[in-house]
């Protein structure tokens, strides 16, 4: 069951500021988070920052913000960052690799953790923050997709607060009643409606997608996002991942969650009640809005986003998704219903396939094929109740997905 209690806000120091760790600070979510924090210096202090290999970008942030900790996932980049920190005479402590990420997720100076590392790489550090009882802002879907039961149990045991950052889940959270001890049925919720833009290929026929390039797939019509999540939007796999995430966050069966295509991305999601009411959260396509909401919750702060002018809207369209056009969504919805390790397997296969596509080593339509083939070979009785079991399923799925991707790429060249 999703846990949305009031988290500890002890402050990173005697100033009473809320100490924030931004995991994935150089990505789009990380940059938006730092933008919101900069607007409220009397409320928040950046305590820790992390990046994968974006050394120069993280160095600029360290110089500007002087955090207590900085982590480079890449050990060589960490050594270079440490050299620069010493030469500059900064007090920032440089850490490296997964151990460094876990350390800042658990650090006593940190009250709030923005979990924005893309992909499965963010699972262990996010789980560490949850186990440490932090306020965790979930911007990466993968921890719940891969290990939802594990994460939610850890939150219940530690008293951690989980707040969704995905615009869709944040919208649902805002539209649900604050007290849901009796579950969604007890709160009168009939259905959760997750909106999907449809991405750049919403109106293109499947037969035209074989030769699309990574740049075309990443050209999202509404949102500015990283390349991996942009491809997920183009395949609509992101919506399947979001269905699984919503199941865990809101303690809902997959059958109670519906995907609705909404090309304008103005309505970020909706909740339908048994009395016929439908509540929606609306706003500009700017991730600073859900970030500001979660950072300050249960209060509200300025996000730097202008108000939505309803009279300026040309119109709002809604339609059901076409799983024939978007087979990845069909595969993901089946995985959501299957449960167990299916989410971990699906996520691993998707990451392999998307990476191959971005490297121009796999055709766009083959992404869904790789995922479906990998899921078809996965053992249904895998261990979804332990981190070791989930990571083992992830590794095995990556190996299988790599084989399938190679075969499909070879078939395309024959």
Image: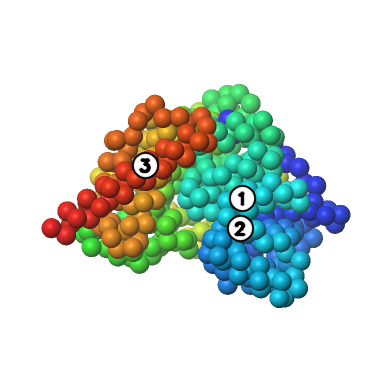
Q: Quadrant location of residue 208?
A: bottom left
The furthest residue to the right: 14
Left or right position of 103 against 362: right
The kind of secondary structure element at disc 2 is strand
Dot 2: within a 10 Å radius of its alpha carbon, few (fewer than 14), some, or many (20 or more) residues?
A: many
For disc 1, the marked residue is 99
Q: Of circles 2 and 3, which is in front?
A: 2
Dot 3: within a 10 Å radius of its alpha carbon, few (fewer than 14), some, or many (20 or more) residues?
A: many
Q: How is the structure coloured here?
A: rainbow
The kind of secondary structure element at disc 3 is helix
Tell me if I can see residue 9 in this picture.
yes
The numbered mark, 3 or 1, whose residue comes first in the sequence reads 1
Front in this rendered view, residue 409 or 330: 409
> Residue at the location (76% across, 42% down)?
8
- Location of residue 317 with respect to 380 vertically, above or below: below
Which quarter of the figure is the C terminus placed in? bottom left
- Location of residue 100 with respect to 191 vertically, above or below: below
The furthest residue to the bottom: 87
- Location of residue 317 with respect to 40 vertically, above or below: above
Left or right position of 369 against 191: left
Q: Are marks 1 and 2 in contact (CB under 8 Å)?
A: yes
For disc 2, the marked residue is 96
Across and down, in percent, residue 412 comes to 18, 57
For residue 397, which numbered disc appears in the image? Answer: 3
> Residue at the location (67% across, 52% down)?
104
Which quarter of the figure is the N terminus placed in? top right
Front in this rendered view, residue 96 or 271: 96
Q: Are marks 3 and 1 in contact (CB under 8 Å)?
A: no
Tell me if I can see residue 192 in this picture.
no
> Residue at the location (71% across, 76% down)?
87
């Amino acid at each position: 069951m999703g846990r949305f209690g009031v988290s500890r806000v002890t402050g990173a120091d005697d100033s009473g500021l809320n100490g924030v760790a931004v995991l994935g600070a150089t990505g789009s979510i990380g940059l938006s988070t730092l933008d919101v924090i900069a607007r409220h210096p009397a409320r928040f202090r950046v305590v820790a920052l992390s990046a994968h290999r974006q050394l120069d970008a993280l160095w600029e942030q360290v110089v500007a913000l002087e955090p207590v900790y900085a982590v480079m996932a890449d050990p060589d980049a960490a050594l270079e960052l440490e050299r620069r920190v010493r030469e500059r005479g900064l007090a920032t402590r440089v850490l490296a690799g997964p151990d460094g990420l876990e350390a800042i997720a658990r650090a006593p100076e940190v009250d709030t953790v923005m979990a924005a590392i893309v992909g499965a790489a963010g699972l262990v550090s996010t789980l560490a923050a949850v186990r440490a009882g932090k306020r965790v802002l979930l911007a990466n879907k993968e921890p719940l997709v891969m290990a939802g039961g594990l994460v939610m149990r850890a939150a219940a045991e530690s008293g951690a607060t989980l707040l969704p950052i995905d615009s869709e889940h944040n919208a649902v959270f805002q539209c649900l009643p604050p007290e849901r001890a009796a579950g969604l049925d007890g709160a009168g919720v009939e259905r959760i409606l997750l909106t999907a833009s449809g991405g750049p290929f919403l109106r293109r026929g499947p037969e035209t997608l074989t030769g699309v390039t990574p740049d075309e797939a990443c050209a999202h019509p509404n949102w500015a996002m990283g390349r991996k999540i942009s491809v997920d939007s183009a395949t609509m796999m992101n919506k399947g991942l979001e269905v699984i995430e919503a199941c865990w966050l809101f303690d809902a069966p997959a059958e109670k969650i519906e995907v609705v295509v909404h090309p304008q991305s103005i309505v970020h999601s909706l909740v339908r009640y048994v009395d016929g009411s439908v509540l929606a959260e609306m706003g500009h396509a700017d991730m600073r809005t859900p970030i500001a909401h979660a950072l300050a919750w249960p209060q509200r702060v300025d996000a730097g986003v202008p108000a939505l002018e309803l009279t300026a809207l040309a119109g709002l369209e809604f339609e059901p998704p076409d799983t024939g056009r978007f087979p990845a969504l069909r595969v993901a919805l089946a995985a959501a219903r299957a449960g167990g390790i299916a989410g971990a397997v699906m996520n691993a296969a998707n990451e392999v396939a998307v990476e191959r596509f971005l490297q121009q080593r796999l055709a766009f339509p083959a992404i869904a094929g790789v995922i479906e083939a990998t899921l078809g070979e996965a053992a249904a009785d895998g261990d979804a109740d332990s981190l070791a079991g989930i990571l083992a399923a992830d590794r095995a799925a990556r190996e299988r997905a790599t084989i399938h991707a190679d075969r499909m790429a070879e078939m395309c060249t024959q």
